Image: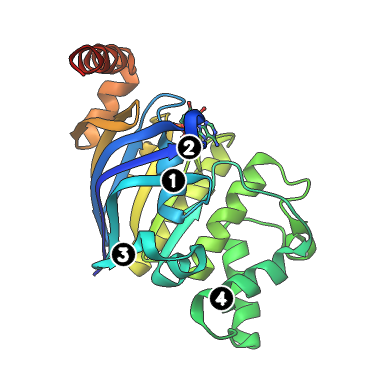
Amino acid sequence: MSVLEIRDLHVSVGEGDEAKEILRGVDLTIRSGETHAIMGPNGSGKSTLAYSIAGHPKYTVTSGSVTLDGEDVLAMSVDERARAGLFLAMQYPVEVPGVSVSNFLRTAATAVKGEAPKLRTWVKDVKTEMAGLEMDPAFAERNVNEGFSGGEKKRHEILQMRLLKPKIAVLDETDSGLDVDALRIVSEGVNRTREDSDLGVLLITHYTRILRYIKPDFVHVFVAGRFVEEGGAELADKLESEGYAAYVKDSAEQAASEAASA
Ligand SMILES: Nc1ncnc2c1ncn2[C@@H]1O[C@H](COP(=O)(O)OP(=O)(O)O)[C@@H](O)[C@H]1O
Ligand SMILES: [Mg+2]
């Protein structure tokens, strides 16, 4: 049983006078076996939250805390976070020219587990997981993400998650750019992991479509760097029909009154 706890997290990007606060007090607790959907408009700071949990150097935590089972995540390097059991599926996976998928996965697994996986079982595991995500075995020899379609990149992210077996996974718009078949395949990969490893999931999205495949226990609405509403799966249906406009308006009015009283 693992718990990721985010408390009053404030995060900025940029330096000095250019610094801009993106996360403005984020509170969230995710336990093993729970799936939390974070939904919000473009530019609200969802990816900033994902990167801040993963430890991207561009984002500066100005206050607040993130702990995993009581350990201070913010004090950990990016690879320490991965070893502790955190995983990020990126919204825009990066190309790694010159590194094959097969080498990349084995290096990542070795780094996360602290020892190289046994070759025989490893090769079999990779094959099984690729088949489960309906990926052509030829992908193992291609360079990471180079020339991959949007859907292939997202499958590769889920393949990593399947093999690295994290405790808590942050999936940043894993649904974007997927056709309906790829969406189902990727969602099934996430659901298998929820079942066989009691994974905790932070599912970031701005469409409700993926929530038909991956059922969330909690839905959180995220606007302008903070949560503005929380509910169960039914909240997603409300967002589907009404959009974010009312939340965006409330949030802008609140920011204006805060600025006026400051
Ligand atoms: N490296 C950066 N430099 C400057 N602004 C950034 C940077 N990263 C994110 N932002 C800004 O932070 C805001 C939130 O971005 P992001 O977290 O990507 O939102 P979302 O994922 O919800 O669409 C946006 O206004 C974006 O332009
Ligand atoms: Mg984003």
Q: Residues within 10 Å of mark 4 (few under 14, many from 20)?
A: some
Vertical placement of 2 versus 146: above or below?
below
Vertical placement of 204 versus 79: above or below?
above
Foreground pick, 257 / 104: 257
Q: In which quarter of the image is the N terminus?
A: bottom left
Of the numbered discs 3 and 1, the one sitting upstream in the chain is: 1
* Alpha carbons under labels 2 and 3: distance apart: 21 Å
Identity of the residue drawn at 37% across and 68% down: 196
Judge whether residue 98 can be spotted in this image.
yes
Of the numbered discs 2 and 1, the one sitting upstream in the chain is: 2
Secondary structure type for disc 1: strand
Q: Which residue lies furthest to the right in this view?
A: 98
Residue 189 percent location from the top left of the image: 48, 56
Dot 2 and dot 1 residues touching (CB under 8 Å) = yes
Secondary structure type for disc 3: strand
Foreground pick, 131 / 118: 118
Foreground pick, 83 / 217: 83
Which amino acid type corresponds to the residue marked 2 in the rendered image? Answer: Val
Determine if the C-beta at disc 2 is less than 8 A from ligand 1. Answer: yes
Q: Quickly name the residue at label 4.
A: 111
* Alpha carbons under labels 2 and 4: distance apart: 29 Å
Q: Residue 72 carries which label?
A: 3
Of the numbered discs 4 and 3, the one sitting upstream in the chain is: 3
Q: Quickly name the residue at label 1.
A: 60
* Quarter of the image where one finds residue 127: bottom right
Taking the image as shown, residue 42 lies to the left or right of residue 10, namely right
Taking the image as shown, residue 6 lies to the left or right of residue 17, namely left
Vertical placement of 86 versus 147: above or below?
below
Dot 3 and dot 1 residues touching (CB under 8 Å) = no
Q: Quickly name the residue at label 2.
A: 13
